[in-house]
Image (cartoon, rainbow, N blue to C red):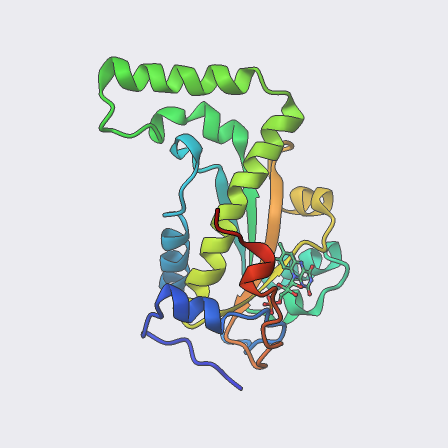
Amino acid sequence: MTIEASPEIMTVTQAAEARRSIRTFEPTPIPREHMQEILRVTGLAPSPWNLQPWRFVVVEDAETKAKLQEAAYGQAQIGNAPSVIVLYSDMSDAIDTVEETVHPGMRGAQGDKAAADIRSTFAAFSDADRAAWGFAESNIALGFLLLTAQAHGYNTSPMLGFQPEKVKELLGLPVDARIPALIAIGVGTEEGFAHHRHPLERIARFV
Ligand SMILES: Cc1cc2nc3c(=O)[nH]c(=O)nc-3n(C[C@H](O)[C@H](O)[C@H](O)COP(=O)(O)O)c2cc1C
């Protein structure tokens, strides 16, 4: 089945029901404005202190994509998707520029105190804990991204099967960056597998 990228935007429930991992794609490039809108909506994801540690590199260049595929154990969907989004966390940038993310509603001394509190909280973290924090929170953006892409008529394949150090070197990412996923994205040419999920009573209880 070929799913056309469509201007009809799905509801969250429609996107969650329709989304599957798709690993073969039409080669047609994704218009820049579609990608920008998907990433803008993804950026509406919440994060503690509104710190927004997620960053994106959209790989469209064939040569770079080929090197990325190599760093991802040759996973074919990287080669055949028109774009691959590298979602990473950059805690150094997030903390260095915390004034940008403290809400403008917190004026003057209140905003300064919020920024100082955030900096002193992270100063007490080890480097590894700080990176793990950024990784965990950036996974919220991953969920938003997969649903938003689907809602806008695109299919995705999230991947953790890659060598992070090779990806970081290839794209010049910061040393403390962590990568929640590579996401192949495009208009799919397969249906993917039907959902196979725990029933609700297996994973939730009401007390
Ligand atoms: C963070 C993450 C990493 C994944 N890594 C890979 C991967 O490296 N290669 C792959 O083919 N699928 C990968 N998957 C896809 C999962 O296998 C898939 O989401 C799961 O089996 C459920 O199927 P569905 O996405 O079609 O609903 C990954 C999924 C997630 C969310």
| x and y, in percent, of residue 64 in the image | 63, 57
Residue visible at 56% across and 44% down?
88
Quarter occupied by residue 99: top left
Please give the name of the residue rendered at 62% of the width and 34% of the height, measured from the top-left corner: 132
Number of numbered discs overlaid on the protein picture = 0
Residue in the foreground of this view, choosing between 143 and 64? 143
In percent of width and height, residue 141 lies at 48, 48
Ligand 1 falls in quadrant = bottom right
State left or right for residue 185 relative to residue 31. right
* 169 sits to left or right of 58: right
Residue at position x 70%, y 57% in the image: 67
Farthest front residue?
Answer: 207
Q: Which residue is found at the position 50% from the left and 54% from the top?
A: 143
Instruction: Using the rendered image of the protein, determine whether residue 45 is visible from the camera's viewpoint.
Output: yes
Who is closer to the viewer here, 127 or 92? 127
x then y, percent, for residue 95: 47, 25
| Position of 187 relative to 62 (above/below) | below
Q: Residue furthest right?
A: 73
Q: Relative to 127, say whether 23 is above or below.
A: below
Residue 128's spot in the image, x, y percent?
66, 27
Q: Using the image as rendered, state which of residue 15 and residue 69 is in the foreground.
A: 15
106 to 207, vertically: above or below: above
**Residue 172 in sight here:** no
